[in-house]
Amino acid sequence: MQTRAQRNRLIEENLPLVGYLAAETHARATHVPKEDLAGAGALALVTAAAAFDPTLGVPFGAYARRRILGAFADEMRAMDWASRGIRRRIKETVAVRETLTAALGRDATVDEIATAMASTTEQVAEALSDAARSVTTLEGTTADSLTGDFPLPEESALLAERRHVLAAAVQALPERMRLIVQAVYIDERPVKEIADELGVSHSAVSQQRSEAVRLLRDALGRYFADGPSPAPVSRVSASAREAFFARMGEVGGKRVAMALAAASV
């Protein structure tokens, strides 16, 4: 098992990888803010370092890359605003465009696509515009295609510990944040759908989700800290953050509570 110093070194040495992959992915998925990708990637790097087992002979860089890209895919799914009906219309329109383009040997025009679909040019233009910012049309940005075929290491005690800590942290989130995290990352529901259900704006849900991710990063950083906890990245007040850590200790049990307390001094 690695020491905390070794895990911290892995994180420090591979932070540039997060920035590189965030910039590369943002270039293909411009609807997702690069800072959100970087935040999700940094959290994935921390958890990858915590779960990494060097005895399995897997290079950490390749292992971390898979985890980071998987986090990016989750982030893009969370930002996907399109309803099922919109997704179906986008898929049909793009399929017709590709078929016509292949048959004609050139890019199909909006008028040609509309004629083939017995639709209006306005509807086709709207669908193609939606396609440009929909996660569903980015062939290279799904979880499977981003992460490739590199095999994950088998389960380890450290991986189980990381999962336990993360589960405790999620349960300790303020209720609204916890509901949003559950809906976005576990139920994989579009942000727009969640916003409609909660009666708030798309932006409000995205802000709450981003703050929840920052709190989770604070939780992992504090739990796995080798000495005093690192500077927080969440924007909540110090008292709210400490209340979150206290709830996390209650949910996670004595070991989690002791580790959080030890890192606070």
Image: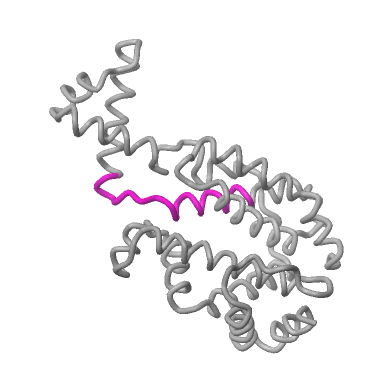
Colour theme? one colour
Q: Identify the residue shown where x is 71% and y is 55%.
A: 153
* Residue 251 location (% of width, % of height): 59, 85
Residue 117 against residue 263 in the figure, above or below: above
Residue 113: give x, y in percent of width and height: 23, 23
Q: Quarter of the image holding residue 192?
A: bottom left
Residue nearer the viewer, 197 or 115: 197
The residue positioned farthest toward the front in the image shown: 237
Q: Is residue 167 above or below residue 76?
A: below
Q: Is residue 201 magenta?
A: no
Residue 85 painted magenta? yes
Q: Which residues are magenta?
A: 68-86
Quadrant containing the C terminus is bottom right
As drawn, 111 above or below 216 = above
Indicate the position of residue 20 as horizontal and vertical percent values: 67, 40
Residue at the extreme top: 105
Residues 232 and 64: in front is 232
Relative placement, left or right, of 177 versus 257 is: left
Give the residue drawn at x 25%, y 30%. 125
User: Exactly how many numbered labels are in the figure?
Assistant: 0
Residue 87 position, x and y percent, is: 30, 44
State whether residue 252 appears in this view. Answer: no
Q: Say whether residue 102 is left or right of residue 253.
A: left
**Whether residue 184 can be seen here:** yes
Name the main secondary structure of what is drawn in magenta. helix
Residue 247 placement, left or right of 153: left
Which residue is at 73% across, 85% downward? 255
Quadrant containing the N terminus in the rendered view = bottom right
Q: Residue at x 18, y 27 (%)?
A: 121
Q: Quadrant of residue 126?
A: top left
